Image (cartoon, helix red, strand yellow):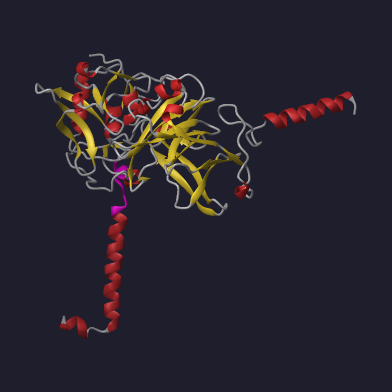
Amino acid sequence: MTVLSRAPRPWLVFLALFALACSLAAVTVAKASFWSANCNYATPSQTANLTRDGGQTYSNVARYEGYQWGGGCWNNDDVDASWGDPPENVGTQGEGGDCSGLTFKTWRESTNTGDGASYYWAPLRNVHGPYDAASFRAGIGAANGTVYKPYAGVMDAFASSYHIGMVFFRATSGADQIVEAKCELCGTNIWLRTYRSDPAYGGVRRIGWTG
Amino acid sequence: MDRLSWTALLAVVAVGGCGGHGRPKALVDGTKPGRSPAALHAVRGAVLTRTQVLHARMLDPSERRACPELRSAGDPLVVRRTGLEGTSLTFEDRAEGGVLGCDGTPGRHELPGPWCGVAAGKLVSARLLDPRLEIGCRRRGKTVAFAWINSLPGARWIGIDEGDAIEVYRAAAGLPVRVASSRSVAVERSSASFHVTQYASDGRLLSKTTLGAAVAR
């Protein structure tokens, strides 16, 4: 403290500028978003395979990888690289999908709503797809349909106007283990949910499971 | 004027009438646009869209039944909009504290009736954090994007630049304004942008922005 107070004024100016430069450099590094650093826009590969257990495996990779509003890009290191981003902001470009983005990729859908064929999207291929939860709930899109809730099975889904989650396992209690991208703070995971008995939720399904 | 000159004149009129650069003469339902508000006389190419505020029970029954979000909503106040590219319904979701709606373009759709899309957004302090982009509708081979715009305090009119016209929407019922445009839609990125201007009731320009929107949730 004594040294600083006796230091000549130019040194104080230099220290202040040095600190400012360091903080600016840190901000610049932080600005490289997860999308720009890790994600790609490669053409998806059309595939004949569309199995429910394949869907389970695929969505399981997305667990612990975080949540991004309007997003659909994640790796497989079980760490959310952008935890706690501001909600409902696609500009944060963080890791993870949102609820409808996770469903779109797991269900191997096309960005063309009139196309019901299957496409494999690699986890790091950033895509959300044209549907939000309300669209899925209404069964919009050639690949999508509705299902009577008691009949909803593994990798079918429950959707409300504001959220969608896929059945990972059907629990004996009447609830379901649901795999879902839920929020910036809670990320993507499997939780026990009662969407099946919640009137706000309808049953929805991918049309064309091959197994 | 000889026969050739008449033919040439007719050809010029025909081309002028069909060309893409004239101001659109009809809304998406074939009706004429309203007269542009006097306060917006300085806005070149302004075309007034139709805005109706009515209770859900006053809608055409087929229109009401076909909108999934309206089925269990009771009889809310609905803002019905008809623009150059599409029609929409917007109403409050009192149960969840949000806004709900249905979007439509002419033609056949997977949903029954006039609707090809649905929308839902949560309100935070009477505003949407996200414009709730919907890109499932098509018209004349082009994807039509729908989004809600939060009107600024004091804003009476919202303009959407469509290139050859400025679509003018009237703010109504204190709800976000559902607009439609096919001008800047990127289906592969599930996103679209809207060139938005907002005007006060006296025509004063309040803001001019480009809204980037992406499909989310």
Please name the residue shown 36% across and 25% down the image: B68
Q: Residue A6: x and y, percent?
A: 21, 85
Q: Residue A142: x and y, percent?
A: 38, 19
Residue A37 drawn in magenta: yes
Q: Residue B128: x and y, percent?
A: 36, 44
From the image, give the main secondary structure of the stretch colored magenta. helix
The one of B149 and A75 positioned closer to us in this rendering: B149
The mark tally for this picture is 0
Residue B19 drawn in magenta: no
Question: Residue A178: which quarter of the image?
Answer: top left
Q: Residue furthest right?
A: B2
The residue segment tinted magenta is A30-38
Please name the residue shown 84% across and 26% down the image: B6
Please name the residue shown 42% across and 42% down the image: B176
Q: Residue A27: x and y, percent?
A: 30, 58
Which quadrant of the figure contains the C terminus of chain A? top left
The answer to whether A124 appears left or right of B10 in the picture is left
Which quadrant of the figure contains the N terminus of chain A? bottom left
**Any part of residue B197 in sight:** no
**Any part of residue A16 in sight:** yes
